[in-house]
Every structure is written in structure tokens, then in C-alpha cells.
Amino acid sequence: MPPPGSKTAYAVLGMLASGPRSGYDIRKEVEQLLGHFWHESYGQIYPVLHRLQEEGLIRSRTLPQKGRPDRNEYSITADGLAELQEWLARPVDRTPPRNELLLKVFFGEHSDPATVRALIVHYREELQVALERLRNTIAEMDAAVGADPAHAYWRLTAELGIRSMQAVSEWCDDAIGTLKKMERE
Amino acid sequence: MPPPGSKTAYAVLGMLASGPRSGYDIRKEVEQLLGHFWHESYGQIYPVLHRLQEEGLIRSRTLPQKGRPDRNEYSITADGLAELQEWLARPVDRTPPRNELLLKVFFGEHSDPATVRALIVHYREELQVALERLRNTIAEMDAAVGADPAHAYWRLTAELGIRSMQAVSEWCDDAIGTLKKMERE
DNA sequence: ATGAGCATGTAACTGGTTACATGATTTA
DNA sequence: TAAATCATGTAACCAGTTACATGCTCAT
């Protein structure tokens, strides 16, 4: 029943559940669609593909190509789908939190309000970019697929992305205000 | 100039910046105060303490104790404080996101709405507990220290904790509603 | 002709967790 | 008397990143 642990294995399995893909495809798709809440690197994907194949959860066929390296296309097996579904039904294991921004804010007393404020200002800028990008993706997806039932799940993830980014963004505004007040004192 | 990378090193340095502590103390305090956004394990703290001492960023003295192991109390050096402050001024490096709940939600099409809903319900319960715990800590801290300027920074971190948990909690409510609707169709 | 994209992979490294070992003391 | 707390540490493991290597094709 293992592959235990490795989220990457399940991410890969999940991607293959909607159709055959190469390692390269998986990477690209994860970045595009899941980029706001997930990430995978090649160094993780390729070894996992090999392992999953050994375990019979996926299988591959090699498509020769002219001029570029052969394309290894993987598809999920019945066992793989079962494994995926079993994992999906298990409650998420909560991973220990690590928010570097908050760590720095907490240590703010050993620096000064202006420095901390600059940190938050910078963070907010990056946040705004990510928020804008996600909003655009949502608009594109909504236009492209409409009320597709498969799309509904992606839509849920996007919704949480928007909301939590908004919440953080508002906190940034307020924190910047508070720190400005502290600077004046 | 190194210790590069390791957030643990900076977390430890930051803790020692407000006074001498043992590895054990650090662990406990991180859990109590920073628990809602940070985590450290002994297996990480003790080696880091040794390394930081070799690098001259902290120094230790051993307090013999009757009946229990000697207490190694570390304090930050001038170099250590400088290193901490340098790090504090640098913008946070954004770590690749990994939200397992959203990963499962996204793969919901390979399971079914009811299963996904159960996942979110369970998640929301744990969230509520964490939210309650943080609210209590805030009440205690506010009562204990009042408008202490050092406390102000902690207060900022708590504020973000509350807000983002609330945002996620609201999303859970809505998502559960959406999934119920999907179940009926 | 330059660079981006296609496509695969590996090795070295880093960061972190878990489980173990030790053992007295205080509290319930 | 059982369990939690104090207090240290290590070894084995796991997950993940980064940098590297290869080499063709297509668009600018």
C-alpha cells in the first residue's frame, strides 16, 4: 500500500487521473493551474514517476519524436486510481506552520518599526501581483469552461486563494498603519 | 557571514535576542507564543545552537543542577545581534506554496462531493479549535502586558492569525454549501 | 544568431522530522 | 504510582531544491 508520505506522489497521481501526461506536462500544468497553492520540481516528479510505475500505480508508453527526446507518457492504472481515492478520503495531515514574514514581525522589537514596515510593504506588493494573476486566471477559466462540473473544484480552490490573499492584504494595510503610528512615538 | 538559509538559526537567534535561554526553553516558548505561525523541533534546535556557538553568534554557560541534566544557557553576542538585524531587514523569501487541503479539493472530480465536503468539515473543526486557542492567548496577553511596546509586535502576528483563520473558516462554510448543492444534482 | 521551449534525467545538498536514549523530580 | 516536566542529545530517515548535463526546434 505504500507510497506513504510523499505528497508529490499523490499530486502526480491526481494529475494523471484526468488523462495521460508526461513529467514535463505535469510540471507545467501544476504551475499554471495549481500555482497559487501547490508546487512541484522536476527533481521530485521524475523519480516519483519511476517509483509509481514500479509499484504499478501508473504505466508508461514511449512516444518517439523527431528531433527531440522521446516523450514518456504516463497513465494511471486501476490500482493507482484506487490509491488516489483512498488518499482523497483521508483527512489532510496538518503540516507545522512556518510563516517567515510573521517570524520577522515578531522579532520587530530587535529592529525598528520602519524596517518592519518596509518588509510588509514589499510583501504586499508581491501579494497584489499574485492576486491580480489569480483574478485573471479565474476570468479566463470562467470564460473558457463556464459551468463545467470538473471546473467547479478548481473554482473552489481559486476562491480560497482570493479570500486569504485579500485578508492578508487588509492586514498589511492595517499593520502598516500601526507601525507608522509607532514610528511617530 | 553564513549561516545562510536555515530559518531555524534565525528563529533561535531571535529568541535569544530577548534574553538567555536553553534549547529547551526556546522550544517551549516558540510553541507557546509563535505556535500559530511557527514550529521548531529539538532535532533542529540543538544542532543549530552548537553551530551558532562555533560561529560566535551566541555563547553559552553551563548551569549545573541537582538531579537533572546540566542546563546549557545560551545568550546572543554582538555579532549574533548584527546577523539577526541584517536578516530582519532583508525581504522574506517566498517559499513555494503547498496546501494539501486545496490539492485534495482540486482532485475532487476523481472522488465525489460528499467526500470532499467531509474533508472540509473536518478541517474547519480543527481550524475552530486553533482560532479559539489563539483568541484565548490574545485575551491573556492583553490582560497581562497591556500596551507594552514589545508586545505590539506579537499582537500584529496574532491579528493576522485571526484574520486568515476567519477567512478560511468562511470559505469552508461556503464551500460546504456549494458541495451540498453539487450532491443534490 | 539568440533565446525560449521541448524533454529527460541525476547528484549533491539542505532542511527538517521521528524515534530513540537517559534519568531525576515534581505533580496529580 | 503513574505521568508530566526538565533537559540533553543523536542517528536514521524523508522530502525537496538546485544545479548540472544533453540536444533539437521554432520563433524573433
Image (spheres, coloured by chain):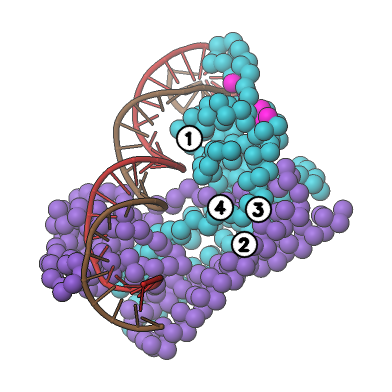
Chain colours: A purple, B cyan, C red, D brown
- Residues rendered magenta in the picture: B72-77
Q: Nearer the viewer, mark 3 or mark 1?
A: 1
Mark nearer the N terminus (3 vs 1): 1
Q: Secondary structure at mark 1?
A: helix
Amino acid residing under circle 3: Thr
Amino acid residing under circle 2: Tyr
Which mark is drawn over residue A123?
2
Amino acid residing under circle 1: Gln
Residue at the farthest right position: A185
The relative height of residue B106 versus residue B146 in the rendered view (above or below) is below
To which chain does the residue with label 1 belong?
B
Residue in the picture at 44% in, 52% down: A94
B84 and B68: which is toward the camera: B84
To which chain does the residue with label 3 belong?
B
- For label 4, the crowd category at 10 Å Cα-Cα, with few meaning under 14, some 14 to 19 and many 20 or more, is some
Relative placement, left or right, of C20 versus A116 is: left
Which mark is drawn over residue B44?
1
To which chain does the residue with label 2 belong?
A
Residue at image mark 4? A99
